[in-house]
Amino acid sequence: MSSADSSSTTSPVDLSRVHLIGIGGAGMSGVARILLSKGATVTGSDAKDSRVILALRSMGAQIAIGHDADNLRLTGELPTAVVTSFAAIPQDNPELVAARENGIAVLRRSDLLAELMSEHTELLLAGTHGKTSTTSMTVVALQAAGLDPSFAIGGQLNKAGTNAHHGTGDVFVAEADESDASLLRYRPKVAVVTNVEPDHLDYFKTAEAYFEVFDQFADRITEDGTLVVCLNDPHAAELGQRAAQRGIRVAGYGTVQAAQQWPDIECRGLITSSTVTDFGTSFECEVTAVAGGAPQTVTVDMHVPGEHMMLNAAAALLAGSIVGGDVTKLAEGLSGFTGVRRRFEHRGTIADGPFAGARVFDDYAHHPTEVAAVLRASHSKVQAQNTGRVVVVFQPHMYSRTMEFSEQFAEALSLADKVVVLDVYGAREQPVPGVDGRIIADKVTADVVYEPDFSRVAEVVASLAQPDDLILTMGAGSVTMLADEILDRLATAN
């Protein structure tokens, strides 16, 4: 594992003037919004302009495009703190170098978030998959219950159109990112773990080290706090068992069958029944807000499909009730949840022509388990509406992940009816000889096309698609740009 920069700090720092490197990113822009709402002077830099940066400028942030040491003086005086992502920003970044030379405190985003949360009741959402969706659901539920939480999430709520908020309530809801062990910088009162499955092995090196960081996270829960674990995920349930043996209060959530498999963990978010609907999933849940107390049964009519989303909603219900939310109002909020951008986000439907009824969705899934969950949800939606097939356009994310999970990706993608595999989006990694989308495509058992030319993908999809198909663009990279291109190509077909 790589270590934190020696100049980073967890001690109180002056946050009156903060400079954020990579301010346009999902995580950075969120904490920037909160700082601005609290009256801080915010400056920043990013490699390119974007709608996010435009929005931050409208709130008062001064932002430079490109990285330069002079960016630290955008206001005429040096910042009191510089914030960076050690995964995305190289150590020789000129702004980082200048910060060290000037003796300015350098923080990780997680350090800053810990500072912002320190005077609140911390409700943190962790896990290999589902963090953003579950965090977003929890925020929407608590807002419906009138608690006005502060929050920082890795995506934008479709309904609120933002990824962060400085609320008037006591609760602060945030994702706890395990990818670089930064979740160990927090002290949650309620910590939710949706699932645990080896990932980010470029950082952790071994599965054992990856599992260990979640145990360490559980140990950081406050003495009066609660670890909330998904009983449908064996590794999360095992984490709960180990935590309980160390004296940590543990609450489980999940289906009846899962609860029966883990009888020594009190299931305080019990899903007793569920039905797939045209718009998503409807389920009943028995929520026990206080350990050993009486359960309260509520119904949630979700507008997002899939068992994984139902489980995420149960987590939000339980966690929200533990921090004081009225269970009925929490359920009402979840019934109005319309999703998160890039999480099974509906991008458009073809009105007429040869592809009439075809629907295009976009999803961030970039791990085999996430891919499989989204494709199963897609099939459930198609079957419920008795229409079309599932066509997926998948872009592998990072060479290390592609090498590690090529067989698992192929197995997951084979759940679709038609598959288009693109080349690898390297993100922060350099290309690896012999590692491209072909090593996944060659193992897919469904009807598959390997298309390395990004500009040809919309045409390839048009050659595969039929009326009423459900078409998915999927991955954590630039594949999201193709959704609109595919819509345009299908809409203009003769």
Image: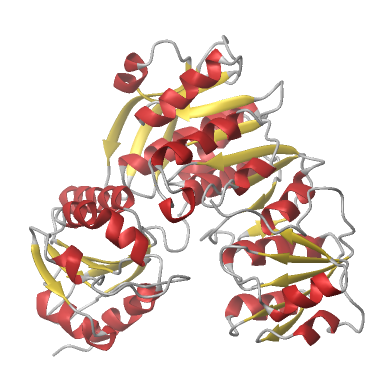
Residue 442 drawn above or below residue 64: above
Give percent across and percent down for residue 472: 27, 65
Residue 266 image offset from top left, x and y in percent: 48, 14
Residue shown at the point (31%, 66%) measured from the top left: 396
**Nearer to me, 466 or 252:** 252
> Could you tell me if residue 440 is visible in this image?
yes
* Total marks in image: 0
Looking at the image, residue 55 lies above or below residue 253:
below
Relative to 278, is 53 above or below?
Answer: below
In the rendered image of this protein, does residue 441 appear above or below residue 149?
below
Q: Residue at x 44, y 39 (%)?
A: 312
Q: Quadrant of residue 238?
A: top left
Q: Is residue 469 visible?
A: no
Question: On the picture, is 173 further left or further right than 95?
Answer: left
**Toward which corner of the image does residue 244 lie, by quadrant?**
top right
Q: Quadrant of residue 405?
A: bottom left
Q: x, y (%) of residue 246?
A: 58, 16
What residue do we see at 60% from left, 83% from top?
Answer: 47
Viewer-nearest residue: 122 or 18: 18
Question: In percent of the image, x 40 and y 40: which residue is there?
Answer: 207
Q: Is residue 226 left or right of residue 406?
A: right
Of residue 242 and residue 140, the one placed in the foreground of this image is: 242
Across and down, in percent, residue 118 comes to: 79, 42
